Amino acid sequence: MYLGCIADDLTGATDVALMLQNAGMRTIQSIGVPAGFEPGDADVVVVALKSRTAPAADAAAQSLAALAWLRRRGAGQILFKYCSTFDSTDAGNIGPVADALLDAMGVPFTVACPAFPTNKRTVYLGHLFVGEQLLSDSPMRDHPLTPMRDANLVRVLGRQTKRTVGLVALPTVRQGAAAMKEAFEKLRGSGYGYAIVDAVSDQDLLALGAACAELPLLTGGSGIAMGLPANFGVRRGGEAAIPAVGGHAAVLSGSCSAQSNAQVAQWVKTRPSFRIDPLQLADGMDLATAALAWAEPLLAAGPVLAFATAEPDAVRKAQARLGAQRAGELVEQCLAQVARGLVERGVRRLVVAGGETSGAVVNALGVRALRIGPQIDPGVPWTQTVETPVGEPRLALALKSGNFGTIDFFDKALGMQQ
């Protein structure tokens, strides 16, 4: 195994797995730390955790368990993958997890670069931009779990780590890999533990990949993986096909991001949909059973949507009454039950929006590993289950980060898997 990836949520894992698969690396995605599963001839195993919003100590423990599994199987380099919007709070979890990995590996220094220019996430002078907006001015400032109100990544990471955070700015990046390596050595020699690295184009990320060839640990968004396969001499073809699975289709959306709101709004104009309200769940309403009873007679005619996606005002109202964690848990549990019930009713193609929702769904379905298939939109592929409990059907899953995908993503995805 050339590379081992530790991702802090499920859709982020799928995102980086797609990046590596398209670059020609044989890639398997594991749901959680693998148990009783061996990677075979995979060049990369991406371990998908549910650690982004877990308590920092739990997130570090999960990540160290994944690290141990990957290193026992010979992973030559480790990538800690987090969101391209650096989703975290002052308490973590990016800094605490990265610190734990550095300590466990006995490594003094690494880089941090969440840039993903294809999806309009760029880093300039250490500041993270979403399109033309600073992160702190984007809809991420109102994220229900990890509101991002500071775009300066040197400051953001500096509040989360016991190490000192420096910057490798764009003028150095544009001088190429050798100049970046020299900058890394200077920072490390001066006692810095991290370097935030600017990147505003794919070429910057390719150069960064080359500069990181000798670093045992990297941290970043999926974009940082773009330049890694060349370091291992991988030159195989890219995108892989997956066989059709047939059966019914459905969409589940738990994300409350601005993009998921737009995608749900586009769907409900013309297609059947069922809304799940966390306040009704808290009052004891069995919305999972209601949603399944509603969906069952419709499935033969075409795909349906069950969603808890809501605008920021509705999210704040639910969180004010229930708390952010409780509101999220109620929605995840309900959508997981709906997913299980839909599969029992013949659904074999499932689109899921939201990292936390995707994690809850695959756990409910007993999915243990995924084969990466063709790209739907940047950062989002179709996948197919590899490891499922005996007797369970093979499924096609599209697991979407809340912020990713075009406004017609749901229709586009399902149109690829007829």
Image (cartoon, rainbow, N blue to C red):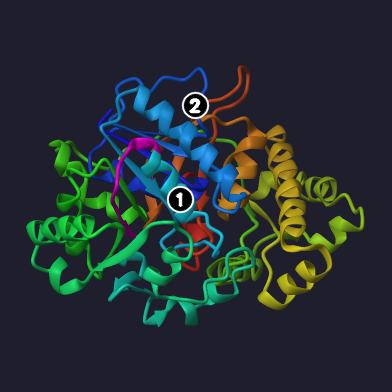
For image coordinates 22% across by 44% down, the residue present is 215
Mark carried by residue 34? 2
Question: Is 349 part of what is drawn in magenta?
Answer: no
Q: In x, y percent, where is residue 208?
A: 19, 57
235 relative position to 134: left or right: left
SS at badge 2: loop
Q: Residue at x 55, y 64 (%)?
A: 89
Identity of the residue drawn at 22% across and 55% down: 188
Q: Nearer the viewer, residue 351 or 208?
A: 208
Residue type, numbered disc 1? Gly
Q: Which residue position holds label 1?
A: 12
At numbered mark 1, what does the secondary structure look like: helix, strand or loop?
A: helix
Pick the front one: 302 or 383: 383
Q: In the image, residue 207 lies at what x, y percent? A: 15, 57
Q: Is residue 390 visible?
A: yes
Report the magenta residues as a range.
104-115
**Which image quadrant is residue 199 in?**
bottom left
Instruction: Please name the residue shown 45% across and 55% down the image.
Output: 95
Q: Residues within 10 Å of mark 1 (few under 14, many from 20)?
A: many
Q: Earlier in the sequence, mark 2 or mark 1?
A: 1
| Drawn side of residue 108 relative to residue 407, left or right | left
Seen in the picture, residue 5 relative to 189 is either above or below; the reply is above
